Amino acid sequence: MSEQRFKRYTITSALPYANGPLHIGHLAGCYIPSDIYVRYLRSQGRDVAYVCGSDEHGVAITIKAKNEGISPQEVVDRYHEMMKSSFQEFGISFDHYSRTSAKIHHETAAQLFLELYEKGEFVEQVTEQYYDQEAQQFLADRYIEGTCPKCGYEHAYGDQCEKCGSSLSPTDLINPTSKLSGSVPVLKETKHWFLDLGRYTSFLKKWILEDHKEDWKNNVLGQCRSWLEAGEGLQPRSMTRDMDWGIPVPLKEAEGKVLYVWFDAPIGYISSTKEWALAKGVDWEPYWKDKDTKLVHFIGKDNIVFHCITFPAILKTHGEFILPENVPANEFLNLEGDKISTSRNWAVWLHEYLEEFPGKQDVLRYVLTANAPETKDNDFTWKDFQARNNSELVAIYGNFVNRAVVLTHKYFGGTVPEKKELSPFDQETLDAAAAFPGKVAESLERFRFREALALMMDFARLGNKYLADTEPWKTIKTDKERTATILNVALNIAADLCVLSAPFLPHTALKLSRMLDLPERGWGDIAKGDLLLSGHQINETSLLFEKIEDDQVEAQVNKLLDTKKSNEKKVTKAAPMKEIISFDDFARLDMRIVTILEAEKVKKSKKLLKLQVDTGLGKRTVLSGIAEFFEPEDLVGRQVTMLLNLAPRKMMGVLSEGMVLMAEAEDGSYKLLQPHEGTTPGAQIS
């Protein structure tokens, strides 16, 4: 749909979860891309509401509060303020940043639930839910951990496997345990209100896979397709939970229950818009209910299902709200070859970066955009951070601007000189420059931010090359008029660069505009002619970027190495003992030594290996989640311990006939339980 079709824009970024600080993975995933897009829209004079807020409900908050011995409110208050101030200092230009514990959000979410309830959209069901007998409470999805039935990942949550992305129900998990006590939970009846997502399958298939097949990203379409075309189809999803932290379900018969966090959280976009509109004195409804509004959700890939399936189903069944025109989700960013992990402190934290690299917000914006995980997971390294700053920002962008301004002050007293006759090379350069705004705009409107940034830097290269090839420091000796033309062209390229780079490098663009004494200009002003007219007085130069030295990078690398060493030394607290069993229970377990005959990787699974083993009673096929720690060829011929009489279970289309026993090491890897000496396959363990 043409951009000219829309009167206004509602742009959202995923609500950051208020249980920890912001890190570079968050920035690369959705906050920098959305900010670039919004700044571009504003430079076009578009009507934009850019909203976000802290996601302050859910199980992770209560777990953190319990571990720290404080209230959930204290947890969210701490991180809300930290995230809000970090966003502001970094330069994420939200029109409004709210929080889901706000009164207006509670009222908005509860009202929307009631409206759907009164329309008869919820299915009331009494179901069996896991209950922790030791903690004496029902367990929300994220309080339950177990093995994913789809990929075999041992630490899947009760609502989703973060390894393969599959949506789960707690009862789908193999060997579930409570995260509260470590005990095995029991099933107990409870009443909840479900949204039957299956009813929306036809609508969602057409809306996503047909209407948006040309403009949505392949990773988004692929994940949606896997949900919509799965054999079992979309299943009813409970919109309520048995918890005491969250938005109370607004029904008399629902005492002690709260709204499901993924019903509540996306509504935070609406309540944040309401707060913004109230403060601004405008009507919020057109930004969510007018078909001439373009709604875009910027998220990470782990939130695709909620923003493309669940939330649109809620909006559609309500009937008054518009649906997103696009959901440009990014993949994940790794750090120095390892997955970013809050629990392992393996991250570059935004608040620490701002302290350790003062004034260098745009360097991080640039590097994270240049290396954005738009189509696949990417890796951030401090060496690349240094190289991009020194060889691109300093040597190209900064060098071009510095030379143009310094030479203008040196030869013309800081006054923009008059442009005389243009040489063929001048005209060729100006023609090339004129094409860049359209190219950058096209990339931005297609959500190709890496491509757009590369084009912006190519524009800076054009200016840098122009000065290098025309050599005004030489022509000044023989032809001052020619030098005046060269610097007039160079300064106007610098002025255009100021406008083009503002969405990507806002702090730098502001410095450059002050240096050039350039009033605020929009994207469309570039095509109207020179932004700097002859006779205009510019200010003295100042460094836009500084070199990042080896010792600065070394300090950051050593900081990560210290974290890794600390994690390796950390003594992991043993999991609580499971309930006492009788000898008869133990005697029912048939554990034996088996020999691995064949081993191969399972297609479409990073974790599973398919093993053929000799049990002494014949050959069996076993799937084992050890692909990340062992090469298949290294396992052939090894003897391991196996639980022989475990009921067969199909995973990834393969029937697994038993379980290879393993021990989890402190670093999260797994060790096979092997006999000290070779023995006959089938030897029993007793």
Image (cartoon, rainbow, N blue to C red):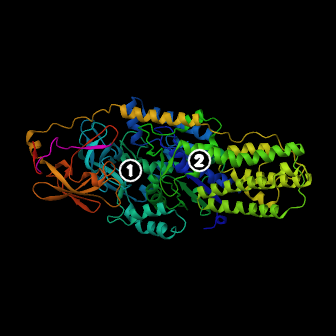
Type of amino acid at the residue the image marks with label 2? Val
Q: Is residue 679 magenta?
A: yes
What is the secondary structure assignment of the residue under circle 2? helix
Q: Is residue 560 magenta?
A: no
Measured as percent of width and height from the top left, residue 314 is found at 46, 58
Look at the image and give the residue range highlighted in magenta. 669-680
Residue identified by numbered label 1:
162
Quadrant occupied by the N terminus: bottom right
| Marks 1, 2: nearer the viewer | 2
Kindly report the secondary structure that dominates the magenta region of the rendered protein.
loop
Q: Is residue 23 left or right of residue 536?
A: left
Q: Earlier in the sequence, mark 1 or mark 2?
A: 1
Dot 2 surroundings within 10 Å: few (below 14), some, or many (20 or more)?
many
Q: Is residue 93 left or right of residue 107?
A: right
| Residue drawn at 17 percent across, 55 percent down | 647
Residue 167, quarter of the rendered image: bottom left
Measured as percent of width and height from the top left, residue 244 is found at 38, 39
Which disc, if any, is residue 467? none
Residue identified by numbered label 2:
367
What whole-number distance in Å separates the C-alpha atoms at marks 1 and 2?
A: 27 Å
For the residue pair 376 and 69, the one nearer the viewer reads as 376
